[in-house]
Amino acid sequence: MKNIIVKTELLCKSFISDGEINNVIKNLDLDIFEGDFTVIMGSSGSGKSTLLYTLSGMDNVITGKVYFEGEDITRLKEKDIAGLRKNKLGFVFQGINLIPNLNVYENILSPTYKTNKERRKIESKIEELLERMDLSAHRKKFPNQMSGGQKQKAAICRALINEPKILFADEPTGALNSSQGQNVLDIFTDINREKQSVVMVTHDLKAALRGNRIIYLKDGRIDGDLRLEDYDKEAANEREETVYKFLKEKGW
């Protein structure tokens, strides 16, 4: 049995719009398991991105609890939450969000500031990530000098530099063309095979195939939970049929 790395209890998240309360997440109980590639799907407005931001400590909880490795992070002060995000959680955005006036190397280095990591180990890790993502020749380039795929790979490097226990990704292929998106998904698959826990929000069927668990949200609640074997490219067509059938049954 896998260990639970993130857990929610009666999680609620609401927003006020035009004077009305919009309940986006509703009394949600969820266990995320260590080493899984968990995919969160649902129609527009189902609460999937809101859930991701809440699980990762990037958004506040209204009521309920979020636990990371058994610790209730909803009780932490903002300083402690920031430290947790820096040292143990990684996040990849759809909009990429690289710092425009820093080059690739500096962007990847930036999360290591004010950590206790040795400079030599940090530099070695950056070199390893640059090599892995085929970015070594682009280390001095600024974001506006790179393709969308290169920028997203740099953002993945940045998210991995502090060796997070879990990597969150919000539509990481949404701004990429099909070839670039495939390359990024291959990276996520590879790092998950090395036991990196991944939680990814996506609306794309091809991206969802990479998960070994697909959670379907509807109106802020879990409406389906599909468990799969680890991704195998050779069995992708059969896997796609299984996932498509599951999603259609849920009204996707």
Image: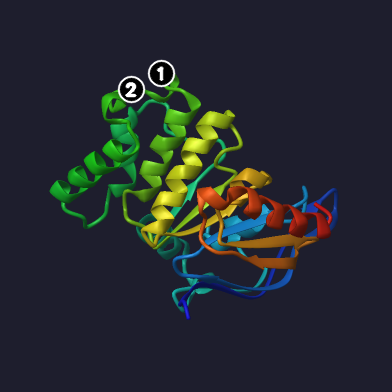
Q: Amino acid at mark 1?
A: Gln
* Residue 201 falls left or right of residue 18: left
SS type, badge 2: loop
* Residue 175 falls left or right of residue 20: left
Q: Which mark is residue 16?
A: none
Whether residue 138 is situated above or below residue 218 in the rendered picture: above
- Percent x, y of residue 25: 73, 64
Residue in the image at 16% along x and 47% along y = 119
Residue 116, quarter of the rendered image: bottom left
Residue in the image at 32% along x and 32% along y = 134
Residue 78 in sight in this render: yes
- Inter-mark Cα distance, 1 to 2: 6 Å
Are the residues at dot 1 and dot 2 in contact (C-beta closer than 8 Å)? yes
- Percent x, y of residue 124: 18, 45
Residue 96 in sight in this render: no
Residue found at the very far left of the displayed protein = 120
Q: Residues within 10 Å of mark 2 (few under 14, many from 20)?
A: some
Residue found at the very far bottom of the displayed protein = 1
- Percent x, y of residue 6: 51, 70
Residue at numbered disc 1: 145
SS type, badge 1: helix
Q: Residues within 10 Å of mark 1 (few under 14, many from 20)?
A: few
Residue in the image at 59% along x and 49% along y = 236
Q: Amino acid at mark 2?
A: Lys
Q: Nearer the viewer, residue 127 or 206?
A: 206
Whether residue 108 is situated above or below residue 77 in the rendered picture: above
Q: Nearer the viewer, residue 225 or 124?
A: 225
Residue in the image at 70% along x and 57% along y = 242
Q: Which mark is residue 141?
A: 2
